[in-house]
Image (cartoon, rainbow, N blue to C red):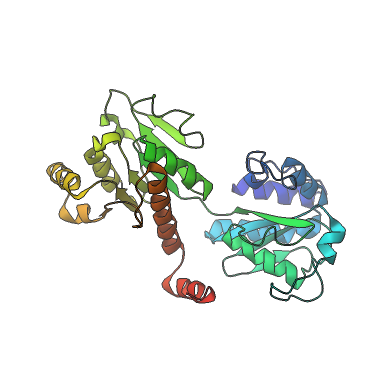
Amino acid sequence: MERATLERIIDDLEAGRTPALATGDFPAFSAEAAAGNPHVGPEALDAIAASLTAADIPTFQRALRALDEGDLAWLGFKVVFDPAAAVGNVDNEVTKKYGEQGSADGEPLVFFCNDAKEIVAAREPSPRDVFQMKDVTRGPSMHNEQFDGLTWVSVPLFDQVRVVLLGASDAAAEVAALADHVGFVVTAVDYDPAYLNEDRFPAAERVLLHGGNFDELANLPGHPGDYVCVLTRGHMFDPEACVWAVQNGAHYIGMMGCAGKNSTVHDLVIDAGLTEADWDRIKRPIGLKFGAKTPAELAIAIVAELVDVRYRARYGEEARARHEASLGR
């Protein structure tokens, strides 16, 4: 989310204008993201824009402050497609009771919610609304389609984590698709366009190296927040990939491979100037351990680990303990 986008919306509302909300700024409403869902799409975003008034200014101002402060926060959207059903449906015997009222009203709504569960909105939500509003802290997740007549989507007000795939192997292609699906920004790097192409990596930024090797990798800028997966084809350029990841201070580095191969990579990276402490920073083998063998299975193991690393980076030990306790774990 760009600061200028929020400022423009606030300016429009202060001037009594209907702001233009673009799917580029609110990608949850893009045709790609909404594929197969008739209730969410560019038309729904236009309807929400048309519903905004000066009363919504504090919501966007709170979002602007969260953006400036680096708060873990979201702009959420209540999308109504059947007003009577949205207001009238009630909980059944399985779900927790939130009173005899469904949604507070049958109108669309933009709201702010952060990880501390602070909610800012132009209108008073019902207890049922609050239950679903808080769920944006999970994406939104399980409850966005639970009740008839409405659904909920959200846009994060913080940067997504970048996953850098060094190598365009079959496993990397599977990781790219799954990592994109769970909210990572993916960059894939290789030297061979037969492997690094749009068909195999449609949602990733693709960086094509020249010279038939990974020598140009040294010129690629890395960031301390990156999660790096070393997945070069045949492990041929794993040493160069590990050196690049360590030298750029990546938050997470994981490498695929067996103990024998990794021992060879160890010797090569030490010869290249890394220390034993640098080597110990590299998770090997990459991914959670549950018997994965095929590229698709390996991708599940790898992305599951990336999700866990992201979770631990965003939430302290106390917050994680509360979350686990709430799930009965």
Note whether residue 109 is visible. Answer: no
Q: In the picture provided, is 329 more to the left or to the right than 292?
A: right
232 or 221, which is in the foreground?
232
Residue 284 to residue 87: above or below: above
- Among the 4 quarters of the image, the one containing residue 188: top left
- Among the 4 quarters of the image, the one containing residue 193: top left
38 or 119, which is in the foreground?
38
Tell me the residue at 40%/48% (across/down). Answer: 297
Q: In the picture provided, is 43 more to the left or to the right than 247?
A: right
* Badge count: 0
Q: In the picture provided, is 8 more to the left or to the right than 83?
A: left
224 or 67, which is in the foreground?
224
Note whether residue 323 is visible. Answer: yes
Q: In the picture provided, is 42 more to the left or to the right than 314?
A: right
Percent from the top left, x then y, of residue 185?
48, 44
Tell me the residue at 77%/57% (across/down). Answer: 150
Tell me the residue at 50%/50% (across/down). Answer: 160
Residue 224 to residue 272: above or below: below
Residue 199 to residue 154: above or below: above
Tell me the residue at 49%/29% (across/down). Answer: 199
82 or 48, which is in the foreground?
82
